[in-house]
Image (cartoon, helix red, strand yellow):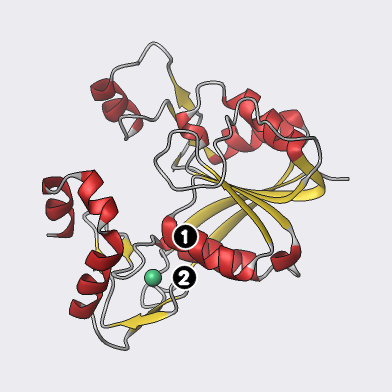
């Protein structure tokens, strides 16, 4: 129902009226059974998407975004760190703006509201300035991903951490740059603007190649958790050892 409506209504109109629409939607989910840590709200349930992911009725955040916040909150003193976030979900950006002192957001394609418009293949920033970078669901869109990874490494401070997530498959990375049409990309890579599907080991290898040390976080949750976290989630914590 939610996804059908989204397809029917023009994106521009949706964006303009998003806050109002979400408030109305949230009323339908009034209750105290589940909790969203991004907008600090309780609901009777989350909105279940066709891929089974649970969407917050009020702030629209996905499970991985709620999980990301819980990860960051475990980092000591993260509120005081210089943070750069690529393509920030709206609700998350609002949350971090309220709790982190030096939180900078960027989006190149203009899909997300952000402070800057940095090109990840040539980041217009000095070396060694960020202590945390959040790069979720970005690299699988970038043809020159190895250039982008080098750039992430360059702008990170020594001992800085880059949190990375993409869709993952088993085995090897699957990429084929002769596949360029939207239809074919959807068929091969699962989304019409993706250019590859990584495997965990494949992406770890590319990160290691530029000097990152990588910890793979396999974050399991009980299926009845009340925060709408996914049962299984994988995040790469790439550290620029100083
Ligand atoms: Zn929420």
Contact? badges 2 and 1 (CB < 8 Å): yes
Which residue: 55% across, 41% down?
Answer: 200
When asked about the image quadrant of residue 77, the answer is bottom right
Say if 113 sits above or below 174 in the image.
below
- Image height of 110 relative to 32, above or below: above
User: Residue 82, how many percent across, how many down?
Assistant: 73, 54
Q: Viewer-proximal residue, 45 or 99?
A: 99
Residue at the spot of label 1: 65
Image quarter for ligand 1: bottom left
Q: Secondary structure at mark 1?
A: helix
Name the disc covering residue 202, or none: none
Q: Position of residue 205 (x, y in %)?
A: 66, 32
Q: As rendered, which of 28 and 173 lies closer to the eye?
A: 28
Residue 85 % position (x, y): 58, 49
Residue 118 picture quarter: top right
Q: Percent x, y for residue 8?
A: 11, 47
* Label 2 within 8 A of ligand 1 by Cβ: yes
The circle drawn on residue 38 is: 2
Asked if residue 153 lies left or right of residue 194, the reply is: right
Q: Quadrant of residue 223?
A: bottom left
Rendered-image quadrant of the C terminus: top right
Residue most toward the front? 16
């Amino acid at each position: 129902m939610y996804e059908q409506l989204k397809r029917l209504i023009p994106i521009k109109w949706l964006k303009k009226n998003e806050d109002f629409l979400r408030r109305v939607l949230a009323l339908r989910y009034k209750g105290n059974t589940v909790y969203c840590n991004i907008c600090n709200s309780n609901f009777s349930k989350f909105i279940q998407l066709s891929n089974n992911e649970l969407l917050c009725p009020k702030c629209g955040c996905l499970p991985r975004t709620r999980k990301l916040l819980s990860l960051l909150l475990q980092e000591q003193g993260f509120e005081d760190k210089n943070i750069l976030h690529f393509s920030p979900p709206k609700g998350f950006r609002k949350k971090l703006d309220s709790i982190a002192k030096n939180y900078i957001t960027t989006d190149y394609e203009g899909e997300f509201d952000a402070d800057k418009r940095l090109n990840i293949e040539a980041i217009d920033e000095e070396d060694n300035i960020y202590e945390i970078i959040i790069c979720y669901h970005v690299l699988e869109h970038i043809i020159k991903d190895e250039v982008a990874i080098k750039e992430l490494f360059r702008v990170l401070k020594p001992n800085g951490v880059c949190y990375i997530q993409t869709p993952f498959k088993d085995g090897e990375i699957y990429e084929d740059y002769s596949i360029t049409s939207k239809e074919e990309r959807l068929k091969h890579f699962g989304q019409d603007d993706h250019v590859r599907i990584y495997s965990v080991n494949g992406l770890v290898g590319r990160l290691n190649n530029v000097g990152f040390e990588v910890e793979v976080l396999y974050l399991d949750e009980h299926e009845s958790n009340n925060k709408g976290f996914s049962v299984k989630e994988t995040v790469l914590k790439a550290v620029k050892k100083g």
